[in-house]
Image: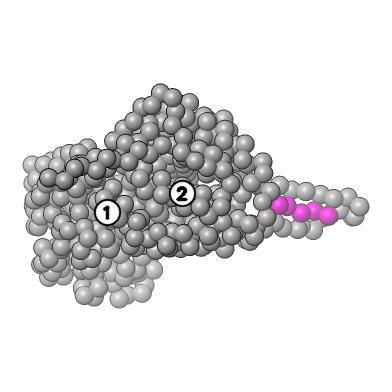
Amino acid sequence: MSEQQPTPEIFHWIEGSQWNPQDGRFFKTKSPLDDRTLGSVSLGSETVIDRAVQAAHSAFDSFRCVAPTQREKWLLQAAELLETRRERLVRILIDEIGSPVSKAEKEVEVALGILRASAGAVRRVTGRTYPSDIGGRLSYSVRQPLGVVAGMTPFNVPLIKAFKQTAMPLATGNTVVLLPSEETPLLVHEVARIYRDAGLPAGVLNVVYGDGSEIGDTLTGHPLVKAVGFTGSYQVGRHVMELCGKLGKRVTLELGGKNPLVVLDDANLKKAIPGCVVGAFLFQGQICMSASRIFVEKGIAPEFRAALSQAVDRIQVGDLHDPGTLIGPIINRRQRERIRRHLEDAIGKGAQVISGNQWQGNILKPTLLSRVDESMLIHNEETFGPVTSIYEVESPEEALHMANQGGFGLSGAIYTNQLDRAMEFAESLNAGMVHVNGSTIQDEPHVPFGGVGKSGFGREGADVAIDELTEWKWVTLHT
């Protein structure tokens, strides 16, 4: 038997290098596939948060004055480094969060787009001139960066979200303190190294590792933090919003969803079935945009149900390095227990299992349900696993009515060849994003990404983030 390799130690990233506090507390990051330890990670505290924020605050005075061409250069250099380190990052995504290789490779591509779009946005941080009623007066406005921006990222797309929460703040002249999910320290450590190697000055980006439930409020509530970006659950997001509201801080929230996917009688099932499979089961359903509610008109319901069931049974499970694999392990024991609880509750109350509901270690086979009703947890709450439910509806109007129930409003999709129906659905669905004849899971770096209601507040994206991350200042000059 070969000697076991020692696991790496990861320390907080403050002022351009790793920093280990004197208390020396650590937590373990584990593989979701087999629960083996991947590394030991320094555990954050109020003291560590304060040091990171102070470092970002100190760096802000000089960073805000950096020329646009230099910020642009750093972001483009970071993109080049990300490209050259692609294989390493894909490997970490597979090991640390159980990402199938195809999803990991796609995540790298999206992250590259975020960096390049943010570099392009540097030169769009522009002001305005205004006509004045007072003779001899020049009236104009400029945008100025806010200061220290805090970002809190989830486990499911850690590379995408790490760059979303850093690239545009840096492009607009802000400095950053990042608190990633405790499930992803190895990946985010690589992000910090990329920025350092790209030439970003020390202190401009700082990373603290630890349990957000213990130190998240310290970061959000720090008096030097001017804006907060959070991605996570509705319950925690609501708490973050309340705290930011009390303290007068800007906040952008990207929360959960119970995303509807509607299939009308005239839909092209050759497109709709793959869209349902990807929408419901990509990264084992651990995506906020996953299609967890599928509404199908009764006229095609038998045909659709049979076709989707066959497609679900063919989904490849297990080998994360195989490009054909769609389903891998659930991230941790807590989330596995949540999924089991939702399924047991639904089945106990009369839901029918069409496909799946079988565990292989930490992997749940893709699961398709019918006869789900409002009494069940799985109808009302985000399961965040490879589970979706089929609902039969009498009409497009009933589908829209049901899709708008529940208070979530992140993403929605409709499959139909009727342009008027598609446009009516897009206009009337209470969601921040709607897709016609496409999956609920879509993202591009420059679009306004986000939800309404219980799914979030504000928007991410290279264009809209300029408004989110800068402050207008009106200036007059009297001659």
Pick the residue in front: 472 or 399.
472
Which residue range is magenta in the image? Answer: 138-142
Q: Which residue is mark 1?
A: 94
Rendering quarter of residue 438: bottom left
Q: Position of residue 270 (x, y in %)?
A: 21, 75
- Marks 1/2: CA distance? 19 Å
Which SS does the magenta portion mostly show? Answer: strand
Mark 1 touching mark 2, by CB under 8 A? no
Pick the residue in front: 397 or 327.
327
Which residue, as the protein is rendered here, is positioned at the far top?
Answer: 23
* Amino acid on which the number 2 mark rests in the picture: Arg
* Label 2 element class: helix
Q: Position of residue 392 (x, y in %)?
A: 17, 60
* Amino acid on which the number 1 mark rests in the picture: Ile
In-image side of 59 versus 457 (left or right) = right
Asked if 280 appears above or below 475 in the picture, the reply is: below
Q: Which residue is mark 2?
A: 193
Residue lying at 46% horizontally and 49% vertically, measured from the top left: 193
Residue lying at 27% horizontally and 42% vertically, measured from the top left: 38
Q: Going from the N terminus, do you reach mark 1 or mark 2 first?
A: 1
Q: Residues within 10 Å of mark 1 (few under 14, many from 20)?
A: many
**Residue 139 counted in the magenta span:** yes
Pick the residue in front: 138 or 158.
158
